[in-house]
Image (tube, rainbow, N blue to C red):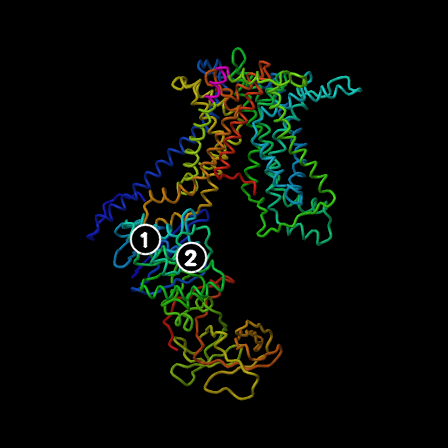
Amino acid sequence: MGQQRAAVICDEKGVRLLRSRIALGEFFALQNMISWVALGFVLLVVLYPLTVILIDSFQEGGPARVTGYSLKAWRLALSDRGIVAAVWNTVALTIARQAIAFPVAILLAWVLARTDLPGARWLEFLFWIAYFLPTLPVAMGWILLLDPDHGLLNLLAMKLPFVKQAPFNIYSFWGIVWTHLATNTIAIKVILLTPLFRNMDAALEDASRVSGAGGITTLRRIVVPVMKPAVLVVLIMSIIQSLQTFELEQVLGFPIRFYVFSTRIYSLLHDDPPMLAAATALSTIILVLMLPLVVLQRRLTGKREYAVVGGKFRTQKVELHRWKWPVFLVVSCVALTVTVLPFSIVTAGTFMKVFGFFGSDTWTLAHWKAVIGDSVFTSSLKNTLLLAISAAMGSVLLFTLLGYIIVRTRFVARNILDLTSWVPSMLPGIILGLGYLSLLLGFAVLQPLYGTMAAMLLAVVISRMTLGVQIIKTNFMQVGNELEEASAVSGASQWDTLRHIFLPLVMPTMLLVGAVSFIAAARDVSTVVLLSTTGTRPLSLLQLDLLAQGNYEGAAVVGVIVVLLTTGVALVARLGGLRVGIQG
Amino acid sequence: MLSVRGLKKTFKTERGVIQAVAGVSFEAPQGQFYTLLGPSGCGKTTTLQCIAGLESPDEGEIELGNTPVFASSRLLDLAAHMRDVGMVFQSYAIWPHMTVYENVAYPLVHGRRKMPNLEVRDRVLKALKLVELETFANRPAPFLSGGQQQRVALARALVDEPKVLLLDEPLSNLDAKLREGMRFELRRLIKRLNITTLFVTHDQIEALSMSDRVAVMFDGRIVQEGTPRQIYLQPENRFVANFVGKVNLFEARVAGRAPGRNGGLLSCNLGELVCGDLAEFGDGDRVLAAIRPEAIVLEKATDSPADHGNSLVSGRIEACFFYGDHIECQVNVCDEIVNVRSDAYTELAIGERVSLIMPRNRIVLFRVPERKDQPRGEIRVDSATAPRAM
């Protein structure tokens, strides 16, 4: 396509024809060049930090003053009891959460998708809200309920005659498990599994019932095995997500010296002197442990065994009869517990003088005034807005470009691009942050960037790359080649086609990606926590710091503001016509 | 007019190199309705896309109305948006974010020649009138039915009065009744405008009823080209006979001459058949005798001998299918199943003995394909032979 050899044209229209062909060739050459640049950039920002982590784990003396290479950090990492305990705790927490959440979520999803439960759509929507709510503010609601000394539920329980001691302690292994379950873990699974169950061909169930099997038998022998591949994918994704959590363990685990690998990395870097090499060694261990899961997930999704969408699925639902209202009650309780309950608690708490104390003089605006009046808050708010808006714009530009190259061009390396864009979803945020930190500290030319927003921005954008590119790709594939071909055949140039056909049709999706990136950047903690300094601290990290100082009320206020900010953007996007796939 | 010479196109896929178009040449003079007919994968859509400029062939020459648009020898490859064609896609490709008016006006507003608004309005309304959608001008595209979308696509393709109109299976997404009506409308419209049209389809009824000329394609090549009548009544090889319509095929051996210009006797499992034209075959040659189900005359069992020099065989009805406007029977003749078509008013019963008259001029002969290089079930194309006069 880039042939530029002189052609013998013996036509009086020759000059025009020649020019058009060369212009075509040039355009393709330009498109190709952009693709190569994009590929190079993505490989760099995704794979290089990983490589740097590996290299740094062998270094002695700290990043900028490499004195030599050795296995010292590795020996430390593998022998230090704290680090080994952290790895074990990570695994234990994950197993505990998944073992409880998974069966509960399957049951909930099945009830929501395949029975005639009243208000099923609204209940499902509540679980979506749970997923979107930032973790920390909701966790603070639970702290206010389950704190061993001041928690509301504890105080109420102790009023009972036979209770001598505070029964609930959120600062414990099971406290952390509970808080995870009550914020994200169950909710994510429910919103992923419900569409899967809904799309399953009802005829499969009907065939089972016609053959004489009852409800539970059908569930066990037909529904579960048919759904198994898809459900397995969801399970693996959840496990990978569980391994990556940071905020809750930092807030609830640190006071009792309970570490998981992400919080251990954080503490290693805040040691004196910072133990970068040990942190990178620990990161590598975790990545290696995650590798089989990642490979397994890739293979399962690649095989497409999980496509159980039947051509015509009937809306025939399982009837609950007299179970209808009891089930409705139970499901509503669960849905409200993971959303409305903790959030109302924490919001109420911001207005109370002393939490849990209902006296004549309970309500106050003092905490709000204190926080908003603080210049630290204003600068953090500015940082969050700056970070989120730049992340939204950067994400849209980058992901649209990548999506276009992968779906719409014949670029030779587009499969590599696709694969690379999938990698960030496998990386825990803290490791990604660590990678960029090592990158910045290790190169003199990059060091001035440390402490600026640039690194945070890059980290936040990259961390959301997988989902963003996926959304864009799906939309581009739906838009279909023929709409653009029809424009070309109608005589419009490539540029006109782009402007009048392509962009208007993908604009809603691009806005969706922008909104999602904004929300993710505003609430992100683990990716930016290692890259942020006092000057660039966003609201999400301000919460952490306030909690660490014991200023629960201030942290709660900041948390509520973050929720309002993210919900506000989500609502605006929704009003603007964006739909997040509840319909499945 | 449309002229295609020596078109070749290969695709490199994960499954290897696929030769989609392997040397296709044809010409359609001004105003002709020319159809490419073939099963999926035969290369007809790729050929169409090469003509439109959406694909670049590896070799060949394409001329649209005396303007060369592609010539591999001269490194000429005009971009799609510079070719003077109109195209209707199989999915219609109506832009959902525009109204009907904006869809049809698009080639005039963003296309090759930009026109003043007044003239655009004039032409758009004229085009919409052609397809009987004048009152729909302001309707948003998503609110159109399938048939309406198809007509908008047609109006859009014609609004700029292109030299050639390309139609990629435009009727296959319509329901049966609508399809029938659209066949006549489409042909009438095209003939009225006298615009050279290339029509691509796998549906033989469309091809036969709408076209001036048909080219049957298989495996990237044209295996027979002619008028619809020629294609159907004088298939040149087994593939065309089988693909276009139904056909009975019997292995036979030439067993001598028969009275008449080139008549011959064929000996086969059914008995002895008289064939009107032996073509290039001679005594003792093995042949495939082909006759269409509707060409055979079915009569109740009779004892009168064959007359008019036509063969008569008798057999027993094994199965009967009522199609509404005709009946198809499977008749067992000497343990061979012969498919016969009869009119719907004849009363026929399973097990009944019937006589089948095989008119000598309706039997076509093909060469028997070599056993060893024909995998089972695959249709092999015999090399085209000269059309036999009937």
Please, what secondary structure does the residue beneath circle 1 have?
A: helix
Q: Position of residue A272 (x, y in %)?
A: 53, 10
Q: What amino acid does circle 2 point to?
A: Gln
Instruction: Give the residues drawn in magenta, as a range.
Output: A373-383
Image quarter hosting the C terminus of chain B: bottom left
Chain-order first, disc 1 or disc 2 = 1
A379 part of magenta stretch: yes
Q: B341 or A146, which lies in front? A: A146
Residue at x 24%, y 47% (from the top left corner): A18
Q: A420 or B315, which lies in front? A: A420
Residue where numbered disc 2 is placed = B150
A300 part of magenta stretch: no
Report the disc number at residue B121.
Answer: 1
Report the disc number at residue B75.
Answer: none
Q: Chain of mark 2?
A: B
Q: Position of residue A584 (x, y in %)?
A: 56, 43
Image quarter hosting the N terminus of chain B: bottom left
Please, what secondary structure does the residue beneath circle 2 have?
A: helix
Work out which residue is located at the far bottom of the displayed protein and give it: B304
Q: What amino acid does circle 1 point to?
A: Arg
Left or right relative to A347: residue B212 = left
